[in-house]
Amino acid sequence: MPKAARAKCVAVSAVVPEKRLTNADLEKMVDTNDEWIVSRTGIKERRIVADGEGLSTLAIPAAQQCLEKAGVSAEDIDGIIVATVTGDYLMPTTANIVQDAIGATKAFAFDLANACNGFVAALSSATAFIESGHSQKILVLGGDIMSSVLNYKDRNTCILFGDGCGAVLVEAGEVDGPGIVDFELHSDGSGAQILSLPCSGSANPPTPEKLANGDHFVFQDGRTVFPHAVRRMAEVSTNLMEKIGITKDDVDILVPHQANLRIIEPTARRMGVSMDKVIINIDKVANTTAGTIPLALADAEERGLLKDGTKVFLVAFGGGFSWGASYLTWGR
Ligand code: UT7
C-alpha cells in the first residue's frame, strides 16, 4: 500500500525524579559495591520517585514540555501512546490520565506494554497510524517507575533499574521528506519466564500472602538474558541496515536501550559504528525500561548531537523477549 505520509519525529523531552540513588547508597542496602556495579553495567546512579508519585507524575510534564518545544497545542493531538509496564494503574491507562491532564481532548489514548522494547514498539505503531493517513500528530511516551516493582533486598535486580519518562511528538510529513525510514519488531515468547513480573496479572493475581513474599517484584535471570540481548540487538540492527541499504556512515547517532554498557558496546561494534556516536546515559539514570530511548534522545539533544537532519538509529531488547530497531532522520 502506498504511504499517505512519512512519520517525522519533531520534538523530544524527558523528565526524571529529583531523588538520586547512588551506588554508594545501594552499598548500604544490599551486599554490593560501586566497583562491581560500574564494571558489570556502567551504572553509577539512578533516579527514584518519591512516595505517592506514579508514572503520570513524570509523563504529564514530559508531554507538556514536548508540545511546547514543538509549538503544537494539545487540542491538535490525534493520539497518545504510552509505552510502559509500570503505569499508574492497569486501568485506567496512563495515556488516558495524560490525555485529560494536558487537555488533548480529541486524542485517542492507550498504553502499550512491550517492556524495554516498549518505546520502539510505540514509535512503530505511531508510524503506522501516520503512514496510513489515519493520524497527523501522535505523542509517543516511554517510561517506567521501576522502583515500584524492585525488591531493594535483591542485589541481582535493584542495582539495575531507575525511574524516568520521555516523550516524542510524531507528525505527518511529505512521503519523501525527513522522518522514519523503516523499523523492525520481533518477539520470542520462549523467553517469557526469564525476565518477568510474576505476580502482576490475571494468571497469578496478587494476594496478601504473595505480596508479603515479594512475588510482585521484578524477576530476572540476568546471566541467561545477557547473551540473548547481545545477539538480538546486533542482529536486528544489522538486518535493518541491510534491508534499507545504509552503512555505518549513514548513522550520525546510535541510541540504544540502556540495560548494560557490555550489551551496547558489542551492538555498536557489529554495526561498525564507533562509540563516540553512541548515546550513553546509563551511568546517570540506569535502565528505565521503556524510558531509556526517549531519555537518551533528550540527552543527545541537550549535548547538541540531535538536530534537524540528524540520522538516528534506535535499537532495544527486553522482557518477553521482544526487540526492535528503527532508523530515521530527525526533525521537520
Ligand atoms: O533491559 C532488559 C534486558 N535485560 C538485560 O539486558 C540484562 C542482561 N543481563 C545483564 O546485564 C547482566 O547479566 C547483569 C548485569 C544482570 C549481571 O552481570 P553478570 O556479569 O551476568 O553477573 P552474574 O549474574 O553472572 O553474577 C556474577 C557474580 C555472581 O557471583 P558468583 O556466583 O560468581 O560468586 C553474583 O552473585 O556477581 C554476583 N552479583 C553481585 N555482586 C555484587 C550479582 N549481583 C551483584 C551485585 N553486587 N549487585
Image: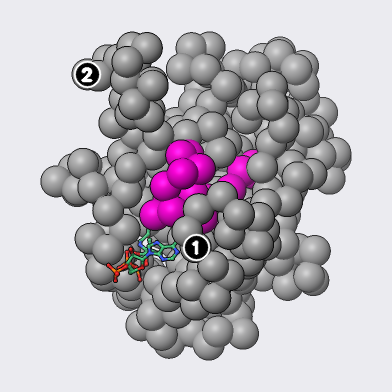
Is residue 303 left or right of 196 when viewed as pictured? right
Which three-letter amino acid code belongs to the residue tagged 2?
Ala
Q: Is residue 185 visible?
A: no
Q: Position of residue 30 (x, y in %)?
A: 50, 53
Q: Which mark is residue 203?
A: 2
Q: Is residue 18 magenta?
A: no
Q: Is residue 158 magenta?
A: yes
The colouring scheme, among rainbow, by chain, secondary structure or one colour, is: one colour
Residue at 63% from the left image edge and 66% from the top image edge: 44
Q: Of helix, strand and loop, which one carries label 1?
A: loop
Residue at 78% from the left image edge and 70% from the top image edge: 303
Q: Is residue 36 shown above or below 3?
A: below
- Quadrant in the picture for the N terminus: top left
- Quadrant in the picture for the C terminus: bottom right
The foreground one among 217 and 192 is 217
Category of crowding for the residue at label 2, using alpha-carbon neighbours closer than 10 angstroms: few (below 14), some (14–19), many (at least 20): few
Magenta range is: 150-165
Residue at 32% from the left image edge and 49% from the top image edge: 220
Which three-letter amino acid code belongs to the residue tagged 1?
Thr
Q: Is residue 182 shown above or below 16?
A: below
Look at discs 2 and 1 and give the one toward the viewer.
1
Quarter of the image where one finds residue 282: bottom right
Q: Is residue 51 visible?
A: yes
Ligand 1 sits in which quadrant?
A: bottom left
Q: Position of residue 7 (x, y in %)?
A: 56, 47
Does the residue tagged 2 have its C-beta within 8 Å of any atom of ligand 1?
no
Quarter of the image where one finds residue 325: bottom left
Residue at 82% from the left image edge and 28% from the top image edge: 73
Q: Which mark is residue 32?
A: 1
